[in-house]
Amino acid sequence: MDFRDGTPTGGGGQDVRKGPEEQDVFWLNRPFRRFLRVNGGRPILVASKEHVFDPALNRNVVKEVDEAMTDPSGRLVRVDEIVGQSWTGLMVPVGAAFICIDPFREHGSRLCYAGFDGYVTEQGNPLCNDCIERNDKNAFWSWLSFGVWNPQRY
């Protein structure tokens, strides 16, 4: 047993530092739960397998359930941390979700992913990309008319 790397086979352990692209995939309580350890940190549950009875086949089958996914910013998040799907189709995690206030009455309430589908303006209003584009056009036309036409900025 090699105690320096923490495993009996010498294949690496939790104290081994690795780059962000190198990840250890290992099964715990084989073959029921698969974990992913990134940079030697705390393991993240990626998928689990469970034995279920399928009446159509009349036998037990192994079903793999995804427990984590990669969001558009590249983070690995658990499935229960996903709030929903944004108006452009992105899966939105808890910390990056907001709803557009729709100041121009062009659409209903939209779930947005902060930084991808929209952002919070300098005035503190959460806007989707469509509303941001219209807000910028209004600012341009206000500048072009030398302030004669001055709509509200959001």
Image: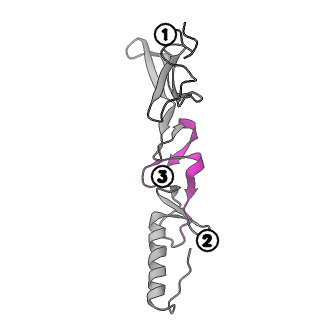
Is there any visible trace of residue 82 in the rendered image? yes
Of the 4 image quadrants, the one containing the N terminus is top right
Do tag 2 and tag 1 residues touch (Cβ < 8 Å)? no
Quarter of image, res 60:
top left
Residue 101: give x, y in percent of width and height. 57, 65
Residue 113: give x, y in percent of width and height. 51, 53
At horizontal 56% and vertical 52% (from top left) the residue drawn is 97
Q: CA distance from mark 1 to mark 3?
A: 46 Å
Q: Secondary structure at mark 2?
A: loop
Relative horizontal placement of residue 58, taking residue 153 as reference (left or right): left
First to last magenta residue range: 78-103
Q: Amino acid at mark 3?
A: Ser
Q: CA distance from mark 2 to mark 1?
A: 58 Å
Q: On the image, numbered disc 2 is attached to which residue?
A: 123
Residue 69: give x, y in percent of width and height. 48, 36
Q: Amino acid at mark 2?
A: Gln
Looking at this rendering, what residue extends furthest in the right direction? 124
Front tag of 1 and 3: 1
Q: Which of the numbered marks, if any, corresponds to residue 86?
A: 3
Of the 4 image quadrants, the one containing the C terminus is bottom right
**Is 102 within the magenta?**
yes
Q: On the image, numbered disc 1 is attached to which residue?
A: 9
Quarter of image, res 130:
bottom left
In depth, the one of 115 and 20 nearer the eye is 20
